[in-house]
Amino acid sequence: MKKELRKWTAKEKEKILQDIQRLGVIIGCRKYNLSKSLYYRWMDRYNALGLEGLEDRRGKNMDAQLKRLEKENRMLKELLVEKELESKLKDELLKKKIVQWNKGRK
């Protein structure tokens, strides 16, 4: 006998996530008969894509979209780090030039 899988709407999943956060992961997952891994998977998708991330993914390529967004996020973080480093280097160079300029004025 095959076990019938429960299907939830995105709104139902959102309410379940909120209830589990209120109750605690262990108690909440027991209440809804969910595995902790499923709860965390839903939570990751919900945090990344909002309610759209909780929609039924069968036939949709949400993983590809999530991976694309994660890659874009990584690239933006790297770009930000490069810009901050560049700014610090310019500041240090400017300080050295000011010190040299002040020495030359005496």
Image (cartoon, rainbow, N blue to C red):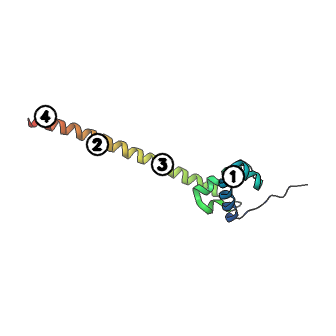
Secondary structure beneath dot 4 equals helix
Q: Where's residue 14, x and y in %?
A: 66, 61
Q: Earlier in the sequence, mark 4 or mark 3?
A: 3
**Nearest-to-viewer mark from 1 and 3:** 1
Rendered residue at 73%/62% (across/down): 8
Rendered residue at 61%/54% (across/down): 64
3D distance between C-alphas at marks 4 and 3:
42 Å
Q: Tell which residue pokes out farthest to the right in this image.
A: 1
3D distance between C-alphas at marks 1 and 2:
47 Å
Rendered residue at 23%/41% (across/down): 94
Q: Where's residue 35, x and y in %?
A: 74, 49
Secondary structure beneath dot 3 equals helix
Q: Where's residue 82, x and y in %?
A: 39, 44
3D distance between C-alphas at marks 2 and 4:
20 Å
Residue bearing mark 4: 103
Q: Earlier in the sequence, mark 4 or mark 1?
A: 1
